[in-house]
Image: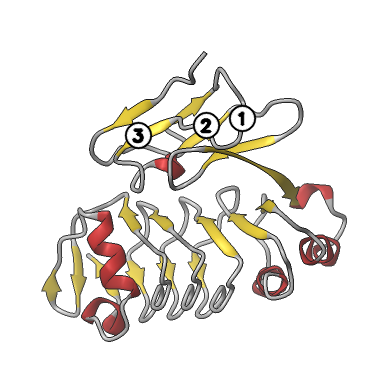
Amino acid sequence: TSPRVITISGILSGDEPIATITPSNYTAGNLVLAGDIAENYQKFAVTPKDGATWSIDSDGKLKTSTTFSQTNYATTQELVDAIKNATGDINVVITTTLSENDLEKIANALMSTQANVTIDLSGTTMAALSASMFANRRKLVKIILPQTLTSIGDSAFQNCPALTAVMIPAGVTKIGKNAFVNCTNLSSVAFETATGWKCATATIDVSNATVNASNLKTSGNAWSQQGLQRQ
């Protein structure tokens, strides 16, 4: 039986995940989403099966990965060591708000690992992401930001070439200078709140996720040079 494919039109709104998919065929590489995928694929969850974690990649296809949950490790250092020694695709799930020092330790583990890493911060109550926190993390493929987030610091994700798509939570009011510059494969930056944004004093349109990504990742672009603010 061919897997069912959901065709999406436009940018879907609502808290993530907006829907959970239970595939008829759990096979990595099977297409489950079509249409406007880039702006939406991170908004879907996939029902786990047989203890394995499944998700949807930027092409709308199923993929499986290993989850490293903070709750399974006695200390941050144990989690850091596990990330460093990992291979394949991994999801690092942070369920409590860490100190800046502990989050930096986890971010630094991405400098040493051979794995392709998703960082899920959605379970935290983090309000601000510090400057350069994930800069130059070449193995960072996805970041899931918490709904409590209000600001993204300067150069927070600068030079993360594996990062392809980001969803900016509704509560964010500031994106710092060069936050996503030189993220060469970034193709989608979608804003849950798409009104009231400015670059310096000029009102800007952030309704197109593809255009947003191009502007934010390009060195010398006004958006990347000056950062964005929402009133």
Residue 105: image location, x then y, percent: 72, 73
Q: Which tag, 3 or 1, sits closer to the chain's start?
A: 1
| Secondary structure of the residue carrying numbered label 2 | loop
The answer for how far apart the CA atoms under marks 2 and 3 are is 11 Å
The amino acid at mark 1 is: Thr
The amino acid at mark 2 is: Asn
| Secondary structure of the residue carrying numbered label 1 | loop
> Which image quadrant is residue 172 in?
bottom left
Q: Give the camera-side residue of 88 and 167.
A: 88
Q: Give the camera-side residue of 59 and 38.
A: 59
Relative height, residue 18 to residue 203 (above, below): above
Q: Residues within 10 Å of mark 2 (few under 14, many from 20)?
A: some
The residue beneath circle 3 is 34
* Res. 73 mark: none
- Residue occupying image coordinates x 48% and y 78%: 159
* Res. 27 mark: 1
The residue beneath circle 2 is 30
Residue 70: image location, x then y, percent: 75, 52
- Residue occupying image coordinates x 53% and y 56%: 142
User: Do the numbered discs 3 and 1 sit on residues whose CB atoms are within 8 Å?
Assistant: no
The answer for how far apart the CA atoms under marks 1 and 2 are is 6 Å
| Secondary structure of the residue carrying numbered label 3 | strand
Residue 156: image location, x then y, percent: 48, 75
User: Do the numbered discs 1 and 2 sit on residues whose CB atoms are within 8 Å?
Assistant: yes
The answer for how far apart the CA atoms under marks 3 and 1 are is 17 Å
